[in-house]
Image: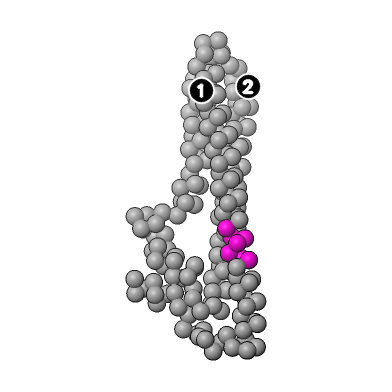
């Protein structure tokens, strides 16, 4: 806990920094900080919504295709049709992976800005203290960052589609 406390408080900022004319400046910095934190939260919410959309879409398609192809009269699907469907499905997986990666990059930039703002605040709770308390995501038993999990899901669906294609064609 001492490590968190050491990371939390900014030794360069004290009560004297919030007197008179400095108070207006620090209030403006804090308002901008709150805006940046809110925007980072919104990016995370949009990222979760995108993941939910793609997960629902791919799960539905996988169930539909498995059911449809399990019927005897659909087993003779032409290879060209199966290949076209596979390319579309793999394209959707690639789109999902790129979307996840884009949101990760966007949030990384936002958290760098938030960290810079915290250098001007009395406490650095969000980036410095919390992230350090979580071991900076190095040990999955302490904290497993979602981005390490979510980037594999589109690839797992792509593998499922490739195996399904191989089963249909071979």
In front here: 114 or 97? 114
Say which element carries label 1: helix
Q: Local crowd at mark 1 within 10 Å, few (<14), some, or many (≥20)? A: few
Crowd around label 2: few <14 · some 14–19 · many ≥20 (10 Å): few
Residue lying furthest front in this view?
A: 20
Q: Position of residue 76 (x, y in %)?
A: 56, 13
Give the residue number, with chain letter if any, for mark 1: 66
Q: Closer to the observer: label 2 or label 1?
A: 1
Instruction: Determine whether, in the image, residue 82 is placed left or right of residue 143.
Output: right
| Magenta-colored segment: predominant secondary structure | helix
Q: Secondary structure at mark 2?
A: helix
Per the image, the residue denoted by label 2 is 81
Residue 65's x, y, as percent?
55, 23
Residue drawn at x 42%, y 74% is: 7
Mark-to-mark CA distance, 2 and 1? 16 Å
Q: Magenta residues?
A: 35-41
Q: Is residue 63 above or below residue 11?
A: above
Q: Name the quarter where the N terminus is drawn.
A: bottom left
Marks 2 and 1, the one that precedes in the sequence: 1
Residue sticking out furthest to the top: 73
Residue at point 58%, 45% (across, down): 49
């Amino acid at each position: 806990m001492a490590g968190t406390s050491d990371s939390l408080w900014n030794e360069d900022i004290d009560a004297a920094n919030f007197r008179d004319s400095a108070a207006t400046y620090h209030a403006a910095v804090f308002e901008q900080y709150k805006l940046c934190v809110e925007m980072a939260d919104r990016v995370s919410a949009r990222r979760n919504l995108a993941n939910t959309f793609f997960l629902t879409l791919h799960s539905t398609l996988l169930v539909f295709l498995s059911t449809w192809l399990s019927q005897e009269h659909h087993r003779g699907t032409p290879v060209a049709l199966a290949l076209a469907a596979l390319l579309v499905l793999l394209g959707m997986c690639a789109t999902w992976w790129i979307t996840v990666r884009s949101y990760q990059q966007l949030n990384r930039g936002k958290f760098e800005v938030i960290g810079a703002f915290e250098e001007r605040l009395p406490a650095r709770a969000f980036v410095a203290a919390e992230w350090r308390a979580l071991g900076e995501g190095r040990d999955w038993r302490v904290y497993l960052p979602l981005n390490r999990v979510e980037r594999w899901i589109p690839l797992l669906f792509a593998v499922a589609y490739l195996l399904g294609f191989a089963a249909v064609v071979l």
